[in-house]
Amino acid sequence: MNVLITGVLGMVGSHMLDFLLEKPNIKIYGFCRWNESMDNIEHLTEVINKKERVELIYGDLNDYASIQCAIEKSKPNYVFHLGAQSYPQTSFDSPIETLQTNIIGTTNLLEAIRKSEYKDALIHVCASSEIFGRVPEHKLPIDEECSIHPASPYAISKVGTDLIGRYYAEAYGMKIMTTRMFTHTGPRRGDVFHESTFAKQIAMIEYGLQEPKILVGNLNSLRTYADVRDAVRAYWILLTINPISGEYYNIGGNFTCSVGETLEYLLSKSKVPNIEVVLDMDRFRPIDANLQIPNTTKFKNHTGWEPKIPYNKTMDDLLDYWRLRINNGRKFLNR
């Protein structure tokens, strides 16, 4: 069984790689660019060097020829399309790159698969809960049929990703399923996301690398948190338990709180008391998706999936992840 993962060097892709390595008889191909950071899979260097279970192959979603080559090399039975420009804040400054990578890049991938010998591969297209954007309270919790009101170029790009996946399933009979994953986090989360920058800043303060002030953006938005390790398990189940081509699912955790409450929890775990909280206007979005609360009944009823890792452990592990990196002498920007 061959599995191709786009975005294998990201948080989700690297955890998917860890998850699949626990299963026998799977050869995993990681689709990545040559100049990307290998930090998230550094612990697997020995395994990757052997090229027995894992092989990294060059690929760029904006380079159709490289995608064709990657598909021919990997001969996939399963494809997890996790690669994207994934940071909403960046998309306000770089909307064209975001739209190009996430919409055209997804089209490039699906078109290359469609024209290959591996058209019958089971494919997961990862959209995002951000497609729903600003949802009025009377529509909470958000189900799959909720109207969309994307609040960033990133969210708009994920609307395109979602619709393209469904189109290729319907138009060409490809075995594609789409997910709208709500906030998912844990170790390896990028430091541009709120809970991860909180944890990183706390760790830097503990090691004397930042004065005891933590910079924050909007603390009032509500988020429902899931652990990334539960997320990749959900993605595997998506393709292996009665997969239905063209279906689309909301997936998310079962713990909801405000961004400010997440900050309070992480501060309660700090070894430094009385850290000052400072609003940084550069961390505010022009428009915020402020009520991210999912209805995941459809996916749970279809697959039996439930989140297993509690919120406290997710946040504790995230904070310890940053402490370990900083303790090992790594240097990071104050962002």
Image (cartoon, grey):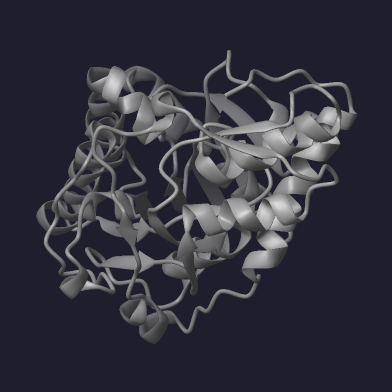
Task: Pick whichever, 228 or 152, lies toward us.
Answer: 152
Seen in the picture, residue 16 relative to 335 is either above or below; the reply is below
Q: Give the residue displayed 22% in from the left and 19% down from the top.
A: 96
Image position of 199 with respect to 179: above or below: above
Q: Total of numbered circles in the picture?
A: 0
Q: Is residue 119 above or below residue 33?
A: below
- Residue placed furthest toward the top: 35
Q: Quadrant of the N terminus?
A: bottom right
In the rendered image, residue 292, in percent from the top left (x then y), is placed at 34, 60
Can the viewer see residue 1 in this picture?
Answer: no
Relative image position of residue 163 (x, y in whole percent): 16, 49
> At which x and y percent is residue 57?
56, 26
On the image, which quarter does residue 36 sit in? top right
Q: Is residue 243 above or below residue 25?
A: below
Which one is nearer the viewer's eye here, 79 or 164? 164
For residue 109, what is the image quadrant?
A: top left
Q: Residue at x 69, y 35 (%)?
A: 200
Q: Quadrant of the C terminus?
A: top right
Q: Position of residue 187 (x, y in %)?
A: 69, 47
- Residue 8 visible? The answer is yes
**Residue 314 vs residue 60, the one in the foreground:** 314
The residue under the point 38% across, 53% down is 221
Please indicate whether residue 238 sits to the left or right of residue 309 in the image: left
* Horizontal side of residue 15 vs 329, given as left or right: left
Identify which residue is drawn at 79% across, 29% down: 49
